[in-house]
Amino acid sequence: MKLRGFSQIIDADYIARITNNSKPQDSGIHQAIGSFILAFMLATGIATATERQRVVPAQFQGEWSDNLESCGSRGSQGQLFMSPDRIEFYESSGPISEIVTHGKFDLELTVELSGEGQTWLSNRYFRLSDDRKSLTDITNGNPGFVRYRCP
């Protein structure tokens, strides 16, 4: 299992090794440091299970828009359509080549986007709200770009 936090992937096996270190001269300090790091990450919510997925999980799929009045039409710059293996923005779209979830609410995608005569690889990061009614694109950092689930 991998744990994600502080913009890094932290190997849970490493934490287990340092918290159960068998070297007598180092065991006390390593165990204390490892236990502190693990407890801090779990208590603050910055550690979440990271899993590769074959398709985009259902809770992220669908039509999303920054303006609910534009739902159902494909003319809004703030719209996003996400299917199990494809993403579509206003002026670009493409197949999703890599899908990683970080817990239930964070999604990391690698997408081969095409638009306006060009093709490029894009890494995208999304956070789903607790009520699953809004999806925030945090690719460029917080606060991010918020879209709402279309009915």
Image (cartoon, helix red, strand yellow):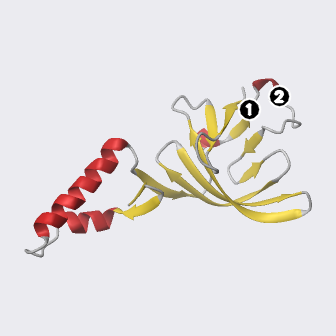
Q: Amino acid at mark 2?
A: Ser
Tell me where residue 132 sits by quadrant. top right
Residue 56 showing in the rendered view: no
- Mark 1 element type: loop
Q: If the image is split into quadrants, where does the C terminus sit?
A: top right
Residue 88 to residue 17: above or below: above
Residue matched to label 1? 66
Q: Where is mark 2, residue-wise? A: 70
Question: For the point 63% across and 56% down, which residue is it?
Answer: 109
* Distance of label 1 from label 2 (alpha carbons): 8 Å
Camera-near label (1 vs 2) is 1
For the question of whether residue 83 can be seen, the reply is yes
- The quarter in which the N terminus is drawn is bottom left
Contact, CB < 8 Å: mark 1 with mark 2?
Answer: yes
Give the x, y percent position of residue 112.
75, 62
Q: Residue furthest top?
A: 69
The x, y position of residue 87, in whole percent, is 74, 50
In the structure shown, which secondary structural element does the residue marked by tag 2 occupy? helix
Q: Is residue 4 left or right of residue 22?
A: right
Residue at screen point 31% across, 43% down: 43
In the rendering, at what x and y percent does residue 13 appear?
A: 31, 66
